[in-house]
Amino acid sequence: MRTGLASTMGILATTLALVLTCICDAQTARAATAAPPRAIVRFDPKLYDVKFEVVFAGFPDTTDPAIALNETPFVLPMIMEGAFSRVDRASMRPELWLDSRSDKDLSKRARIDEKQELGMVYAVVPLISFKGSTIRWNVQWRMQSWSCRVDESLLARCTWPREWPENVRDALEPQKGIESNEPFAKTIVTSALGEQVRTTPPWFAAKEILRTVVTGFRSVNSDGMERRGIGRIAGLKLDGAQYAVGQGFGSEHDLVATCVAALRAAGLPARPVVGIAEETTNSRVGSKGSSRTVLQSWGEVYMPEAGWVPFDPNRLRGSTVRQLKVADAWPGVGTMKDLNEWIPISWCFAPRSYESPPIAALWGWRPAGRFSASSLDSTISFQATSRGKGIDDPQ
């Protein structure tokens, strides 16, 4: 009896050991196949319906029509697949009105021009022929936007590459308002990092450059919109990085443009992001501030083997930026939990190879025709309607 019990206990012990070994092997296998930690994670996507509209009007000074155009394309530069946003191509829809008449055939002519600057597309609204006073066109689409979380320790381990990936090299070149090839940009880099830029890890170098730019602005205009009567918006207050640095002040868009120019001058791919956001205005103590929809800009810098990292230099303004340590998390640099409430549209302030309105307003055109007007006026409007939670990334 004792022999039989001992034999049974031995079998049970052996079986238990085998089971534990299998569990340990399975856990080890899962650990071995688990995805490595990522330096940049996007999360909490939100869905939006977006519309961007332009109204172009002329006031005749003769009996001739104020505007006479033929074969004139209007374009809106758009981010289709960003680091923290994605547009549903199937949802894109353009509209065009010539005076009060809707162009019913526009859908047959409208197109998307692929592979434009920085990887954007141009949504093209072609006008065939028009004589009149007012042109109104828009582009509508559905998209989602993510928030961002970064691992500071992993970003700090990034090293300078021998050469940058081909798909980010365009983000090292000058753009309208971002004169990264001018001496002022190199001066900022030298002030931040000295002559040997690559002796500083790229993540720390980016932070030092942002610090130097922000502290170099004596003041920043808090209202970045150029407005006309009754609140109509003509575009952005943007003089460009070179002019703003020379003056020592500018708009929030000039601040972003200067950061991007200096990062590029240091050899770090960077790009501006222009999009829609809700802005809350201050009110009296004890009462709630009001909110309005504005065109807002921020930036993104590329970290080797990690990807694009967002930053908002306006959040760094204030005396505390001088005391921040580069190894610590910085406000508005990297981790941005409310980034999903900012709706990106473009990686430029004005499109390359197209004429822009006198005031930067994202859109461009190639006018072919004549104007018999005492004055010409263009305004923009935009809206983003929340449609709830977006689709999470696959795990």
Image (cartoon, helix red, strand yellow):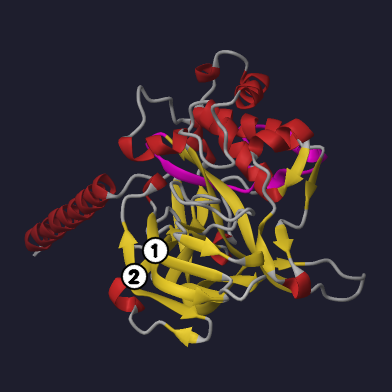
Which numbered circle lies on residue 123? 1
Q: Is residue 380 placed above or below 310 in the rendered structure?
A: below
Dot 2: element = loop
Q: From the viewer's perspective, is 14 left or right of 269?
A: left
Residue under numbered circle 2: 110
The picture places residue 63, in percent across and down from the top left corner, at 61, 76
Q: Nearer the viewer, mark 1 or mark 2?
A: 2
Q: Position of residue 6 (x, y in %)?
A: 12, 58
Q: Residue furthest front?
A: 63
User: Is residue 308 positioned above or below 284 on the image?
Assistant: above
Instruction: Report the amino acid beneath label 1.
Output: Ala
Q: Residue at x 59, y 31 (%)?
A: 262
As drawn, the residue found furthest toward the top would be 195
Whether residue 278 is visible here, answered yes or no, is no
- Of labels 1 and 2, earlier in sequence is 2
Residue 296 picture quarter? bottom right
Q: Amino acid at mark 2?
A: Ala
Image vertical order of residue 346 relative to residue 164, above or below: below
- Residue farthest right in this picture: 285
Would you say residue 320 sits in the magenta stretch? yes
The one nearer the camera, 112 or 252, is: 112
**Magenta segment, which residues?**
304-329
Most foreground residue, 394 or 87:
87
- Between the C-alphas of marks 1 and 2, the distance is 8 Å
